[in-house]
Image (cartoon, grey):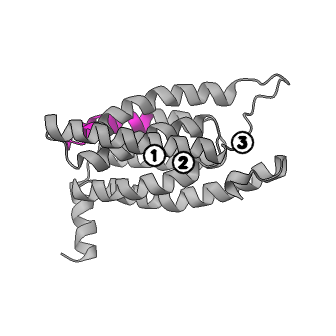
Amino acid sequence: MDFSDAILAAWQAMSLWELAGVLLGVAYLLLAMKEKISCWYAALGSTAIYTVLFWDVSLLMDSALQVYYMAMAVYGWYQWQRKTGSGKAELPISCWSWQTHSAVIASTVWLSVMSGWLLQENTDAAWPFLDSFTTWGAVVTTYMVAKKVLENWLYWIVIDSVAAYLYVDRGLYLTALLMAIYVVIVVIGYVQWRAIYRDEQDLCPATA
């Protein structure tokens, strides 16, 4: 089967629910890139759909992750609209130190190994270690988005790339294409947020 045949097969196999989840997912990322609080409404709808879709294809950790995403959509909306001490409603972009990033990455790898082993021993989950990695990585990175941490975009490049492979393997071709599109968008998002951050203050050492 050549590439065009694979795309046609993916389109034919795609459900309307998957299409809705994809469109809302793209809307979320584009709105987040523009720092629009409405991104969290799109996130809530997309994650509700994918909770069911991922469960149906035995990506158990990804399905559980969507429940967390729904909670974070509410939390992110609250954080982005909450007024600061000066009365300004917009949450400023910030950076984490390299020490914080080191601790976060090490913790994510450890949790991925442990939960991957548990899934492998006790469930029929597909790709338990990669599934766990994308799950724990996304848990941290979604929190970073809610807090407007600049480096969240760099984390997403890695997570979305791995996730694309998982979804191709599970036959969710349109969702895999969404992840590929995400990788392009997050690069643009990082450049835009970085420019905004530099306008507000000197570029932090962690991303210099």
Q: Nearer the viewer, residue 5 or 73?
A: 73
Place of residue 130 in the rendered image (x, y in percent of width and height, measured from the top left): 31, 50
Q: Which residue is mark 1?
A: 25
Question: Viewed as shown, does residue 169 lie left or right of 37?
Answer: left
Q: Which quadrant of the figure has residue 161?
A: bottom left
Q: Which residue is mark 2?
A: 29
Disc on res. 88: none
Q: Which residue is mark 3?
A: 93
Q: What residue is rendered at 30% in x and 46% in y?
A: 131
Q: Few, some or many C-alpha atoms within 10 Å of disc 3 (few <14, some 14-19, many ≥20)?
A: some
Q: What residue is rendered at 29% in x and 54% in y?
A: 167
Q: Is residue 152 visible?
A: yes
Q: Few, some or many C-alpha atoms within 10 Å of disc 1 (few <14, some 14-19, many ≥20)?
A: many
Numbered disc in front, either 1 or 3: 3
Range covered by the magenta-colored residues: 45-60
Tag 1 near tag 3, CB within 8 Å: no
Dominant secondary structure, magenta: helix
Q: Residue flagged by tag 3: what amino acid is it? A: Ile
Q: Residue flagged by tag 1: what amino acid is it? A: Gly
